[in-house]
Amino acid sequence: MEIVQVVGLGLVATFLVLVLKEQKPVFAFLLATFTGVIIFLSLIGKIADVLHVLTRLAEQARVNTLFLETILKIIGIAYIAEFGAQVTRDAGQGSIASKIELAGKILIMVMAIPIITMIIETIVQILPT
Amino acid sequence: MPYNVDAIFQIAGIGIIVAMMHTVLKQMGKEDYAHWVTLIGFIVVLFMVVMLVQDLFQTIKNVFLFHA
């Protein structure tokens, strides 16, 4: 029952943040960040299991490892960017959060360039000249 | 949940105690000491959070980016 633990942790942390926000808002913000990191860390083990299964399946199906690696990197970039943007938005800096999300999108696009190149080259080869 | 949840209570406790000390020192008329206490408490908590965030980023790198 991991979900009960996560929800309980969230409720306790929310209560503490409410108490702390009256006195010192900075500490309340740090506490909220800390709680978010702990919840994410407790979940990432499950994600790792799923990714191991995916990797094994891809090896069995003899998929080009470039594709799987790129997809995993893109998912990782998305997670990190989302986390950073949420923490920044919690602190009230919505504009910086938007820039972080923009950086995430651009980096994902850069990651996807090799695959797009491969697809377009394949299509060009198939097309009759 | 393998991570130490006690750290949450530690941070909340540090915040409450620092707020109390700040109030008491202010009542005694030692404003500069009060600000130092706040700053040091903030640095301690920030250090804890930064260590955990570094752990998180390292884990994300290991899981998603294939030890890149």
Image (cartoon, rainbow, N blue to C red):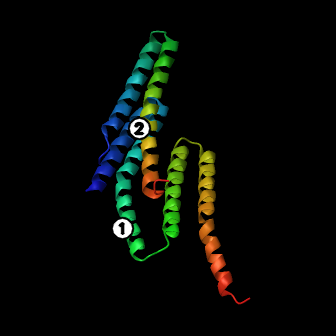
- How far apart in space, not on screen, are marks 1 and 2 (Cα)? 41 Å
Q: Callout 2: residue from which chain?
A: A
The three-letter amino acid code for the residue at tag 2 is Leu
Q: To which residue does mark 2 refer? A: A18
Q: Residue furthest bottom?
A: A128
Residues A51 and A127: in front is A127
The three-letter amino acid code for the residue at tag 1 is Val
Q: Is residue A9 above or below residue A121?
A: above
Q: Label 2: state its secondary structure.
A: helix
Q: Is residue A73 above or below residue B15?
A: below
Residue at the image position 65 percent from the left and 77 percent from the top? A120
Q: Which mark is drawn over residue B52?
A: none
Residue at the image position 46 percent from the left and 37 percent from the top? B50
Q: To which residue does mark 1 refer? A: A53
Q: Residue furthest left?
A: A1
Residue at the image position 59 percent from the left and 62 percent from the top? A111
